[in-house]
Image: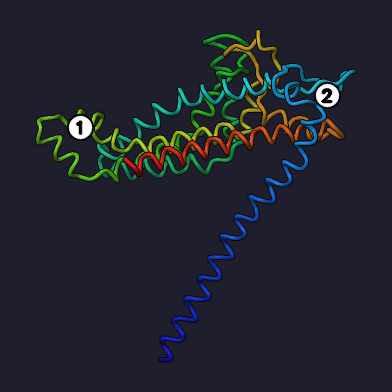
């Protein structure tokens, strides 16, 4: 009886600990959301939603001041799309290799290396980009090197750990019966993997891609160091031109901003926050459809 009471007490204590942990997480999200919206929405209302989101003129210190972030939204989309084009195929192929083809001796080397990529600070990626990627782009492709392409290459490398780890886990989770059935029908190993296993793991692969997009959209320091950080008119945006993204705009100007300028930067964070919410909602929709199927 005494042991039963002690066990029940321990269960109650742990349930309370878990509840408080979950409560702190939810409370943190609510606090961040309230801060952003209470500080950002009034600025958007004062500037005007259309002028803020759909104008490409950004000049907070001009007379009159202008607060249009369209060129930075487009820049963020360009950089993120480039990172996806570079990172997703490489990450997915690496995940397939690790899950299906990699010998155990090599796996012990490659897997820790992939995990180590996730632990490298953003500033180190930025230094690597400045010293290696930017000169390579400048000397072999064109432009001054500080460009959308350089930022996309760095972000493509940075999202690799997310895509590889989640995709590998999803591929390994596919039941062996799928493979056995495919082999029984005469398919080769490559046909089985790319026509049966990978499609069966599509929910996890899409999750990896969406989380990778979230990482690319929210990255700041590495992009600041290699993208050129220039606000370009929409008609001059090109893959070899410098660009400024939403995140780099915030970190570049927040140190000296005040008044409506500061509020407009917080409102830029609101736009980013809404974009991330849309990504998470898309992820939930994909998972629910996969569960129904």
Number of numbered markers: 2
Identify the residue at the far bottom of this view.
Answer: 1
- Where does the image place residue 89, in percent across and percent down from the top left? 39, 26
Spatial separation of the CA atoms under disc 1 and disc 2:
57 Å
Question: Residue 236 in the image: x percent, y percent?
Answer: 66, 8
| SS at badge 1 | helix
159 vs 170: above or below: above
Which callout, 1 or 2, points at the residue further toward the start of the chain?
Answer: 2
**Picture quarter containing residue 261?**
top right
Q: Which residue is mark 1?
A: 192
Q: Nearer the viewer, residue 277 or 162?
A: 277
> Who's the residue at 31% across and 35% down the image?
96
Say how the picture is coloured.
rainbow
Locate the C terminus and report the quarter of the image it occupies: top left
Q: Position of residue 189 (x, y in %)?
A: 18, 32
Residue 8 sits above or below residue 59 on the image: below
Neighbor class of circle 1 (other Cα within 10 Å; few <14, some 14-19, many 20+) is: some
Pointer 2: what residue?
60
Q: Tell me what residue is drawn at x 27 percent, y 38 percent.
A: 102
250 or 38: nearer the viewer = 38
Q: Is residue 69 above or below residue 18?
A: above
Residue 77 placement, left or right of 59: left
Quadrant in which the N terminus is drawn: bottom left
Looking at this rendering, what residue extends furthest in the right direction? 63
Q: Is the residue under label 2 in contact with that under label 1 (CB below 8 Å)? A: no
Q: Nearer the viewer, residue 243 or 129?
A: 243
Position in image of residue 218 (x %, y %):
60, 35
Residue 5 occupies which quadrant of the picture?
A: bottom left
Q: Secondary structure at mark 2?
A: loop
Residue at 60% x, 16% y is: 145
* Circle 2 residues within 10 Å: few <14, some 14–19, many ≥20: some
């Amino acid at each position: 009886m005494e042991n039963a009471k002690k066990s029940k007490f321990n269960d109650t204590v742990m349930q309370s600990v878990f509840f408080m942990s979950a409560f702190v997480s939810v409370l943190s999200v609510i606090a961040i959301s309230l801060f952003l919206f209470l500080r950002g929405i009034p600025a958007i209302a004062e500037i005007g939603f259309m002028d803020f989101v759909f104008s490409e003129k950004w000049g907070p210190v001009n007379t009159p001041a202008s607060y249009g972030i369209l060129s930075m939204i487009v820049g963020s989309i360009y950089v993120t799309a480039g990172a996806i084009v570079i990172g997703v195929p490489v990450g997915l192929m690496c995940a397939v290799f690790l899950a299906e083809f990699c010998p155990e001796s090599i796996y012990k080397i490659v897997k820790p290396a992939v995990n180590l990529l996730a632990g490298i600070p953003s500033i180190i990626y930025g230094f690597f980009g400045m010293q290696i990627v930017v000169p390579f782009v400048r000397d072999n492709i064109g432009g001054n090197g500080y460009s959308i392409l350089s930022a996309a290459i760095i972000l493509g490398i940075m999202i690799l750990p997310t895509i590889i780890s989640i995709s590998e886990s999803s591929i390994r989770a596919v039941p062996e019966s799928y493979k056995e059935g495919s082999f029984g029908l005469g398919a080769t190993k490559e046909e089985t993997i790319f026509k049966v296993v990978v499609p069966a793991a599509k929910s996890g692969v899409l999750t990896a891609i969406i989380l990778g997009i979230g990482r690319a959209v929210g990255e700041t320091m590495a992009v600041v160091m290699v993208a050129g950080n220039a606000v370009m008119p929409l008609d001059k945006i090109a893959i070899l031109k410098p660009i400024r993204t939403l995140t780099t705009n915030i970190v570049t100007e927040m140190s000296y901003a005040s008044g409506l300028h500061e509020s407009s930067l917080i409102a830029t964070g609101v736009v980013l926050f809404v974009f991330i919410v849309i990504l998470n909602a898309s992820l939930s929709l994909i998972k629910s459809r996969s569960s129904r199927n």
